[in-house]
Amino acid sequence: MSETLWRGWARRVAMAPGAVYALILLSLAFALFTAQFLTLHNLTNVGMQGSVLVIVSLGMTLIILSEGIDLSVGPVLGLAGVVLALAVKQQVPLPLAILAAIAVGTTFGALNGALISYLGLPPFVVTLGTFGVAQGCALILSKGSSIPELGPRVQYFYDGQIFGVRVPIILTAIVFLTVYLILYYTKFGTYIFAIGGNQQALTLAGVRTLRYKAGVYLLGGSLAATAALVMTARMNAAHPTVAVGLEFDAIVSVILGGTSFERGKGWLGGSIIGALAITVLRNGLTLVGMSSSWQVSTVGLVIILAIVADALRRI
Amino acid sequence: MSHMWFSSLARLATIVMLLVILSVLSPPFLSLQNLINVVRQASLLFLLASGLTVVILTSGIDLSIGSVLALSASIAATLIKQDWIWVGPLIGLLVGAGCGFLNGLMVALVGLPPFIATYGMLWIAEGFAVVFMKGEIIGGFPSSFRFLGAGHIVGIPVPILGMVVTLSACLFALRRTNFGRYVYMIGANREAARLSGINIRGNLLLVYSLSGFISAFAGLLFISRIGAVESTIGEPLLLPALAAVCIGGTSLFGGEGGIGGTVVGALILTLVTNGMNMLNVSSYWQSLLMGAIVVLSVAVDQLGSARVERT
């Protein structure tokens, strides 16, 4: 191996997103300290548990690439799940129920997008507002309690298999491919990078930036609803506040994955690695036997340390 | 300028309208005793919103106020139950200021976007509060501590006094000190502020520490008034505080607005909440309404200022 090639690789390793290190270190640690971590059964579990976060993180990646943020994905996911469950309970045909849930998510995404893009409002305030609205709607519709026992046809979206592969993994793969194609092979994708880089320049070049910027949030909302399908199937129930805090995990997956809030820089694969790292962290802490109350602060702490380390490395 | 004048008039009209509606709904509402009670309960919102206003003036945000309140109140309460009646609250205040200081470090030194740094702090503080309380409720404080929330000095409830003192201090700091001018300058144009030699890092550290300190102080008054604490008391407090600041007309882009507007915003919100309670509106609707108020008030404000700019 020639020296320049070696240097290039060394540089690439040094500048790899924090998520890569986090995933490797966490996996090594849990593999050493627990016997159950490195089993096929548990790794499949990680993949399944992670699928909800991965799907939401993919949408969040596009939003953060456009220099935005979406704090409302957690409650929107909860609301979409509640709508799905209520529709199923009302004997609505399953495809229609799924469509209704996705329509709700897309509507909230469109609302976020319109307010942020066309009115120029700060994304975190708008989405914190719609956070409250979606949360309120979910609580009102479900009367604040779980909607359980949705039946095997809903559960299929978690337990089912197609050619031996579990359905959530297939769904995640489809979402990834779609978002990947959109981001790297369409005009929309190119514009997302450009909006994050320099929105004004893009507008001056004659591109209708506002509609593309709004489109990013719309996509994020519909992906949140897609994730709601997997989440509801997994629990065989919908709960209005099930996903509160998920937006935090998603944002962190994206940042650890090397997508930056500035200058439209980012990498879609990094977000998946980031989401897996967080899932491994939660899964491992449970295997080690840490109580869920300790997990909240431990996960928060590890995550903040990782972000700070990542930010410091890049200064 | 006419836009500002118009919106203050609109806010005043809203307050008068709400007062009329509430007194029609329930005639005893306008009695002095009830009004004092309403303000006593609202002091929590006023305090949190005033700290948040200072942060937002620097074009920052502090999403962690609710959970910092919960954490510092949990720690203070645990110590008070160990008969450390003076040390407990003091440590609570220190914990609050410390969380704020960490926020400031992440924002000012590391350069993280404020909403990321403080959103992380939200989960860390909440997590530690859960760990600390183990899901239990601590209650039955000694009467010397209850005085803070339920006592009176010269006939005025202590929380109202605490609120008035804090608001006046913030108002004075923003209007009459160099610190206040720096806060506005950092928010209006950070680069210009830096070039004119303002210590941006130091001032931001101070602003975020202040916000944490005020959250902890509000938490002490709160748990002393209701006489108990659990780890989740902070959760529903963030959105109303943010809504109060937004209604009050403080710009989320920084450098514009102030404590006066926030007081008006918090007043409007308090009246709305009271009205909903009188009408027995479920708390589920209140979450929806708070969110809608945040979105609507920033949208209206933005549309208004955009129109002024164009003309």
Image: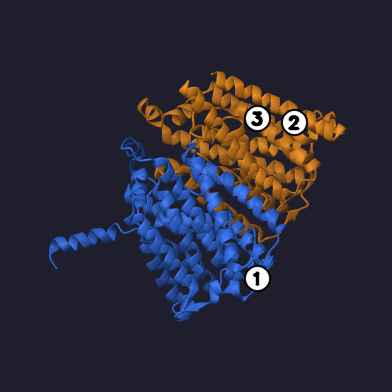
Chain colours: A blue, B orange
Which residue is label 1 attached to? A150
Mark 2 vs mark 1: tell me if same chain. Answer: no
Q: Position of residue A195 (x, y in %)?
A: 37, 43
- In the figure, residue A240 lies in which quadrant? bottom right
Which residue is label 2 attached to? B18
Kindly identify the amino acid type of the residue bearing the numbered disc 3: Val
Which residue is label 3 attached to? B263
Q: Position of residue A109 (x, y in %)?
A: 52, 50
Kindly identify the amino acid type of the residue bearing the numbered disc 1: Leu
| Secondary structure of residue under mark 3 | helix
Instruction: Please state if A2 lies on the left or on the right of A278 as rendered.
Output: left
Q: Does A177 appear above or below B62? A: below
- Residue at 42%, 56% (x, y): give it: A254
Kindly identify the amino acid type of the residue bearing the numbered disc 2: Leu
Q: CA distance from mark 3 to mark 1?
A: 48 Å
| Residue A300 shows up from this direction | no
B75 or B189: which is nearer to us? B189
